[in-house]
Each structure stands twice: as structure tokens, then as C-alpha cells.
Image (cartoon, helix red, strand yellow):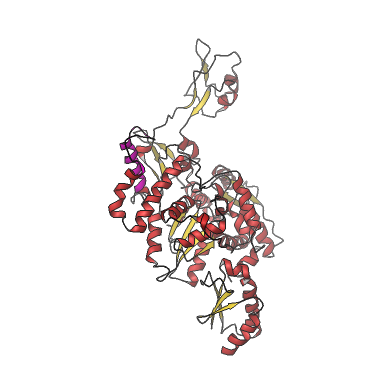
Amino acid sequence: MRKFDTKVQYLQYKVLREVARAAWQGTLAEGVLDIPRRIVPGKVPTMRCCVYKERAILTERVKLALGGDKNNPNVIEVIDIACDECPVGGYEVSPACRGCLAHRCEDVCRKDAIVFDIHQKAHIDKSKCVECGACANVCPYSAISNHKRPCENACKVKAISMDDNKAARIDNQACIACGACVYQCPFGAIMDKSFIADTIRILKESEGSSRYRVYAVVAPSISSQFRYAKLGQVISGIKALGFHTVVEAALGADMVAFAEAKELVEKGLLTSSCCPAFVDYVHKQFPQLTSYISHNLSPMAAIAQYIKEGEPEARVVFIGPCTAKKMEFQREEVAPHIDSVLTFEELQALFDSKEVDITTLEEDVLDNASYYGRIFARSGGLSDAIVQGIKEIGAEGFEARPVICDGIEECRKALLRLSKNALNGNFVEGMACLGGCINGAGCLTHGDKNKAEVDKYGLEAYEKTISEAVSLLQ
Amino acid sequence: MELVICIGSSCHLKGSRQVVERLRQLIEEANLMDKVALSGTFCMGNCQKGISVTLDGKLFSLSPENVDGFFEDEVLARG
């Protein structure tokens, strides 16, 4: 059966499904106000203090499912009434402190921030504490814990703070729209805006491909999603929604791998351009390094550009694991190629809104890209593809020395080194999500098996080399 | 002449790359590079029969084996 990692995801899914149903039926205008009541009927609350608050929050979720606040350029938004205003005290000693003799906490603290009261119980002097967590790690009673908000903890670019009402606030100047907070907030108070209604409008107005054709470009991480069905059935399902056909973004990745390998040989030093959150991070935090960003479009945009070159009236919808793609497709250089972006979560809602049970469908096929294009979905895959690309373009004298950055914190370290001319390598593979796209915030499931699934899917590719895959396009 | 070859998943697995490569070769040998514009598309909605190819809008279903015959009968005949 279909599965969500958390109940928050499931709730969000229900909202998206209801909005999508109304959008298909063309009853959004009159039906949208009924959605909260349909999801929370009766008088017994199951999530919050009362059904009225539950419905009020659901109303906000419906707004986000319909595209959210148009005045806010960010695609990640806080639902302030859903924010539980979690404690923000940082590391604190709980009553579990026994007042022991060892005082490991005191010994390990480099800032002398641990003090003891007359009962020998530890306290943290907040004027000295730097929140390193060393004391919490050594306490034999686990009496010290971090009271940091899950959203702030998840946000490694420090874009989340607290507003005057103690609700979370996102600093758009720092936010890279990676969606880590969306996935981590236990109250579902931070959400990504949805373009599901736009996508349905695009599909409906195509009038069964008679006015124009709608292409679905799917990210390779799809191989680790929808595990309750076969990948071929997912492809059939996407077509059943009204898409003309499904194309692998991984073929765009093959194109990028080739072009980026050439660019690396020319320039000698490069940072990758396929992760939009990473690219945004460079622009926002290391503006002096933007000249190193590869000038290639992302795989999503590259393949969409190819589709539209041959068929300018076509529409292209990207379906992937990524919330930052929702920012990317609005950028000037990408907007002409991509018409809408959906996450896998939203695709599931779309299937169910049309009563498409993919497990009952015939298996279709999906094969456009090479092994290398497909493994872009996981950390290290892009670097493997660049090394291979350099081999295939015949620049064997050039040695690619990739620095694989798994997650935005590693990206930050590599960029710091690069800014000081101390990078031990010549190619920065920047991926904002830990593990790569397979752990994107828009995934239905986030699990250890995802990497193995993507590698398996890569090996199943008909084309084994990048040049074979892109030779079709020239 | 416009020669469009389907490189969608289904045709790809039937060997559209081989068809593209062979056609490219044949066009070059016949010195028709200026006359034939070769391009690709994803899915012509005719997946069952073979590798879909259109020549100036007319649909053909090919396989890697009958490309040469198609080239002679259709492309060269028009050239």
C-alpha cells in the first residue's frame, strides 16, 4: 500500500487530493471552503485543541495547495497558527541530573559554562554556552538535552528564527527552499506551495493533447518512490492523468554531464549547477564564487529545452523530490522551458484525485537515459558522471578531482575552502539534501534503501555510456 | 525533407538509437546533409508497431533491420 513517512505528510496529501479533485471537476471556486470540514468532520479533535482550530489550519493548508501567498516570493511558507511555538532554550539540564561526582559535563565544556548549585546539580550558564552539545553527549543520565526547534535544527543555512509571537519566521534572504524544515516540522507548520491546480489546468486545457501536448519530466529518484507498485505502472499512471508521455530528467542529466565535463576541462575549476538549492546558496552566501557555477542549465531545464526546441507549443511539467525546483522553474532562464513543478507527494495526490489506482495498470516503459544520468539522484553520482564524461570526450590528460558535498553543511565547508583557494579538488558537487535528491523534501518515503534502488535503476538503463544516451539528441 | 525519429522510451528500447545512427550514416553517404533535417521527438503515440518515424509528416514504423530499405524506397526516391 502507499505509504507516507509521517502523519503530517499524510494530512498534506489529503488536502492536496481534495484540492485536486475540485480542480478536475472545475468546482474550486464554490467547493474550496468545504475542504477543511470534509477532512475534519464531527466535533472530536484528533490533532489540536478543537476541531475549529484544526479546520482553521486546514484552511491555510488549502491556500498553500492553491499556490499560497502571492506576495511572498518564497515557495516555503510558515503557517503561523499551526506553529506550536516549540521551546527555544537550547541545551538545558533536566531534573534527571543526579548531581553526581564525576562532573563529566564540566570537564568536557570548553567554555566553563557548567555551574553547580548547592545540591551539586548542574546548570548551564547561558551567557557562556555556545550550544556545542558536548555536555549532552557525556552525561551518563542523558539529563542534558537540546531544546532547539526541529525547524531551526533542520535549517542548516540558519534561515529560521522566531517572530514576536514566537512562531517560526523564514528569512527569504537566507532560505534556499531545500524543504528540510518542511519535512522536519512535527506540526506541519512549514509547507511548500503547490502548483497542483496549475498543473491540472494545463492538463485540462490541453483537451486530451489536441491543443498542445503535456510532457512529464520525471526525476530519477522516482525509482525509489511508489514502492507499492512497479515503476512501469507509475509511468502508465502519469499518462492516465493526461500527460502525452513521460521523459527521464536523467537524459537531461546525461546532457549536463557531457557539457559540464567540457566546461570543467576549459575552466579548470567548477561548481555544479544541478541542485537549485545549492546554486541559490552560492548566490546568497558566497556571491564572490558565483563565477565558478557551471553555466549549464539543470538536467530538468536542459531536457525541457530540448523538448520545446522540437515542439515549441508543448508544455513541460517536472515531477521530482524537490521543493527548490519550485523556485528554480520561476527563474528567468528556466521559466520558458518548465511550465509547472510537482513533488512525488503531489503526484500521489493527483493519482488519487482521479481515482487512478496504479497497481491495477499495465506496465509501461521508461528508458531515455544512461546509467550515469540516472545516478545523479544520489550523492556522488554527478561526480561519477563527470569523471566518465571527461573520459568520453577524450580529455584524458585532464584529471577531474571531484569534491563530493553530501548535504548543505558539507557544501558550506567546500565553498569556504574554495573562497580561500584551499579547495582540495577542482569540481564541487553540491547537493543540499543529505544523500542527494533521493532524500528530497518532496519524497513520499525517505529511507536507507533509496540509494540501492537508484543504483539498481541506473544499471537497468539500456544505454551504458553518456555518449550513447546523448547521441540520439544531436 | 524532415525526418523525425521517435526517441521515446518504447522506441528507444526497440533500437531507435541504431536507427538514428544508421540514418545519419546513410544521409552522409548519399550526401543529403543539406536536404534532410534529422530530429528526434518523444512518443508519436504509435508505440506498438515498431520505431516510429515520420518523413514530412507521413508515419512509418521501422526496425534497425529495415532502415536501409526505408531509406532507399522513401528518402532517396524523394531526393
Residue A453 at x, y percent in the picture: 61, 51
Q: Is residue B50 above or below residue A406?
A: below
Residue at left offset 45%, top offset 33%: A149
Q: Residue furthest left?
A: A30
Residue A199 percent across, percent down from the top left: 41, 59
Q: As drawn, which residue projects farthest toward the front?
A: A360
Q: For residue B59, say whether it is visible.
A: yes
Q: Residue at x 37, y 58 (%)?
A: A24
Task: Locate residue A25: give its quadrant.
Answer: bottom left
- Image-based side of A33 in relation to A195, left or right: left
Is residue A73 visible from the viewing direction of this image?
no
At which x and y percent is residue B75? 59, 85
Q: Depth check: A378 or A197 in front?
A: A197
Task: Quadrant for residue A390, please give it.
Answer: bottom right
- Find the magenta span and give its range: A39-62
Q: Is residue A59 magenta?
A: yes
Question: Number of marks in the image?
Answer: 0
Residue at left 43%, top 39%?
A160
Q: Is residue A5 magenta?
A: no
Quadrant where the C terminus of chain A sits is: bottom right
Give above or below for A52 relative to A311: above
Q: Residue furthest top?
A: A118
Left or right of A108 in this view: A18: left
Give the percent coordinates (x, y) of residue A224. 57, 50
Q: Nearer the viewer, residue A454 or A167?
A: A454
User: On the image, which quarter does residue A141 sit in?
Assistant: top right
Viewer-closest of A426 and A15: A15
In the displayed structure image, the side of residue A461 where residue A144 appears, left or right: left
